[in-house]
Image: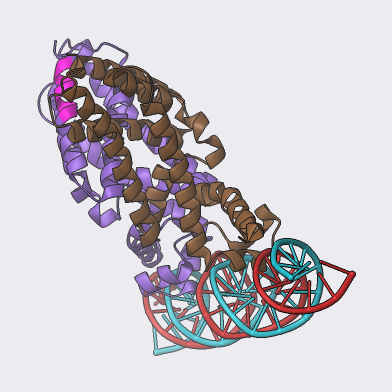
Chain colours: A purple, B brown, C red, D cyan
Amino acid sequence: MSTKAEKTTAFIIETVAPLFNKQGYIGTSMSDLTDATGLTKGAIYGNFENKEALALSAYEYNSKRLLAKIDDVLAAEGNALDKVFALTDFYRSYDVFTQDMGGCPILNTGVDAQGNNRLLSAANREALKEIEGKIALVLENGVNKKELKIPVTPLQFAKQMFTIIQGAVAMSTMTRDRKYLINTITYLDVLIKRELKK
Amino acid sequence: MSTKAEKTTAFIIETVAPLFNKQGYIGTSMSDLTDATGLTKGAIYGNFENKEALALSAYEYNSKRLLAKIDDVLAAEGNALDKVFALTDFYRSYDVFTQDMGGCPILNTGVDAQGNNRLLSAANREALKEIEGKIALVLENGVNKKELKIPVTPLQFAKQMFTIIQGAVAMSTMTRDRKYLINTITYLDVLIKRELKK
DNA sequence: GCCAATATATACCATACAGTATATAGATTT
DNA sequence: AAATCTATATACTGTATGGTATATATTGGC
């Protein structure tokens, strides 16, 4: 159990993840990484095969943090509707949550990797799918327990919800104005109440 | 009137705009540009001060194309509601419109330039503001002519609408699935009918 | 069709890039 | 504590980068 290497591996990932997220894959150079970590190329290449492998690990680190948080939020007390509102509540201050990640990993990597990195792009699509699945599951359970009614399939509603949320994330990211998050989530809550009320 | 230079300047911008849009500012190298245009660095640097100035021109070219199209769409026959639906209709097949641009310039540049290029980022925010303004103006005219009622200010409603639209653009871009566009716009039309009906 | 002005191509710079081979330091085992 | 194994630092590749100085076409005015 080589604890030393595992620790530095983890340290590198944690330190480097926000950089990749903020600056993109190509926009982040190896010297950015050595500067940020205080380590040398030797250390980094000793722990990762190449820049792409590190970027992928960094993305997985970010997306797993987000997914874990969403799990946590969706595990809120109460019925399915309470869980859904716990989620919208989380996204209301999503900018705060993603601050030390360097922004929304889904949006940033999803757009950045699009034309530049197939692996990252695929990992991003996977993460997206997982989030939609988690939301859909809550809705499905709610339907089964007759806590709510949905006009479409749970997955479809989840996709619709998440699209609106991600729109708010995109707009507040691009304009650097958190009002987009706040106002859109407020409106989304109204919509959810209208649509899901039993 | 040096027609020659003006022509090549325009040619360079047109040829290069989709590349910058697809690959991002840093992700697009000067050799990408010489390859795509068939010109040499001498020709490019003879027409543009540097890479950044060219990228900015390319972005302006794309965003102006989009803004002109939006103007065109919002000039549709009929009352304000007809114009709004002409807009949602345009966005329903937005992926087709942006195909030869290399994707949505607002989203791509908005996210890419965020951490890498202040000028591009500012230009993008400006374009965003203009789009919102155009939509808001249509709504305002509709209110004045008593063609529709809005529960909030025209600008606020425009921002809300555009956030949902941009969410659909972001999701369909990241997943490469145009259903996000189609389904979200369909739902948005329902919402608009509900909210704006006089 | 010649000449001046302009526009493009060529050849070159310094620097930054991702990546590697090897040396040194640090930890682990006995 | 010695020896061994592992992890990090150093020094170095070759290549690509954005940018420039200068040479060569190409153009438009007369």
Residue A84: horizontal and vertical position, in percent? 18, 27
In the displayed structure image, the side of residue A151 where residue B121 appears, left or right: right
Magenta stretch contains residue A189: yes
Q: Considering only vertical position in the picture, is B97 above or below A15?
A: above
Q: Main secondary structure of the magenta part?
A: helix
In the displayed structure image, the side of residue B167 where residue A32 appears, left or right: right
Magenta stretch contains residue B22: no
Q: Is residue B32 visible?
A: no
Quarter of the view holding residue A87: top left
Residue B185: horizontal and vertical position, in percent? 35, 22
Number of labels in the image equals 0
Q: Is residue B122 visible?
A: yes
Residue B24: horizontal and vertical position, in percent? 48, 53
In the displayed structure image, the side of residue A7 where residue D23 appears, left or right: right
Q: Considering only vertical position in the picture, is B87 above or below A183?
A: above
Residue A98: horizontal and vertical position, in percent? 25, 50
Quarter of the view holding residue A171: top left
Seen from the viewer's position, the closer of residues A187 and B11 is B11
Q: Considering only vertical position in the picture, is B38 above or below A115?
A: below
- At x 45% / y 72%, what residue is drawn? A31
Quarter of the view holding residue A136: top left
> Which quarter of the rendered picture does the C terminus of chain B lie within?
top left
Looking at the image, the residue that sits furthest to the left is A78
- At x 49% / y 55%, what residue is drawn? B57
Seen from the viewer's position, the closer of residues B84 and A165 is B84
Please provide the residue range marked out in magenta: A187-194
> Which quarter of the rendered picture does the N terminus of chain B lie within?
bottom right
